[in-house]
Image (cartoon, rainbow, N blue to C red):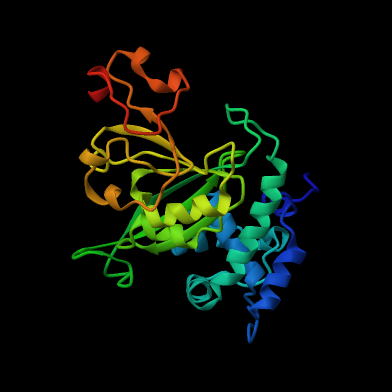
Amino acid sequence: MNSGGTIFAQLMDFVPAYEFRKCVERYKGNHKVISFSCWDQFLCMAFAQLTFRESLRDIQVCLRATQSRLYHLGIRGKVSRNTLAHANQTRDWRIYADFAQILITKARKLYAADSFGIELDQAVYALDSTTIDLCLALFPWAKFRKRKGAIKLHTLLDLHGNIPSMVIITTGKVHDVNILDQLIIEVGAIYIMDRGYLDFACLYKIHQTSARPSGWPWIQRLNPRTLPIRQTLISCTGFVRRSPSRSKGFARRSPFRNPFAHTDEVERNNFSRSRSSTGKTRTGGKKRSKNSRR
């Protein structure tokens, strides 16, 4: 007979319960709670995540099937669909947001020395978003389209260990570029972003905050319509148009005045023409050959 704890209970031993109780006390999460505490709610949702439960009814059926073992799992309150739904709706979300940041901080320390394929002394972050479809009848606040609801999950991923350092949830209508205003820029770090985050005013703030003489604060893929010459990567310490007379769109109104290092698009089946292999940079409107204009 197994006299030890369950696998789930052993996993939860790694969770700092003391830090969780501090988060609960900070926002008075257990105020007027009789039986189903915030810790019980957290254990139920963690169990659902680890066992791939798909609904509240699925969580209830699975946990009630082992009713006599709930005490050994750490769950003291009675698990029911209505109680769990009410807790998810009324409990302060900031309790779990603060606790998630505590867990992320601990995890980042464990993977800080891990390599992700490139030897860099700086911290490297990737910023992107994903759209999660929702039923508009059940989630009327999740505005996205006329007959479709959705939320956006904006994630800043630390590439050392692939650990999210920031997660922001918005409605589907919020554009990706608006998240740049909520970023807390780490001095000396490198940020990798997609073309959806192209806002020269915000990027210039990042440049001013984390400017380093020997590096670039971000790497970004540009929209082909932004510049007359198509580029797939641009690593900047600023922004200068390669040909001011032929620039189009809002690139003409760029606030950047410093030189930048760019990487031309690799032409089909001809990697020898890529400037990324030569390591050269271009800073102004010098005359280009015919091959470079393609």
Asked whether residue 41 is in view, the answer is: no
Q: Residue at x 27, y 32 (%)?
A: 230
Residue placed farthest to the bottom in the image? 32
Q: Residue at x 18, y 65 (%)?
A: 146
Asked whether residue 205 is in view, the answer is: yes
In this rendering, the answer to whether 106 lies above or below 168 is above
Task: Provide residue 95's location: percent of width, then percent of height.
Answer: 61, 70
Residue placed farthest to the left in the image? 146
In this rendering, the answer to whether 31 lies above or below 142 is below
Q: Quadrant of the C terminus?
A: top left
Task: Provide residue 126's location: percent of width, then percent of height.
Answer: 49, 43
Side of 157 relative to 131 (left or right): right
Side of 29 relative to 270 (left or right): right
In this rendering, the answer to whether 155 lies above or below 151 is above
| Quadrant of residue 73 within the rendered picture | bottom right
Q: Residue at x 48, y 52 (%)?
A: 155
Out of 40 and 291, give the one closest to the viewer: 291
Q: How many marks?
A: 0
Out of 289 and 134, give the one closest to the viewer: 289
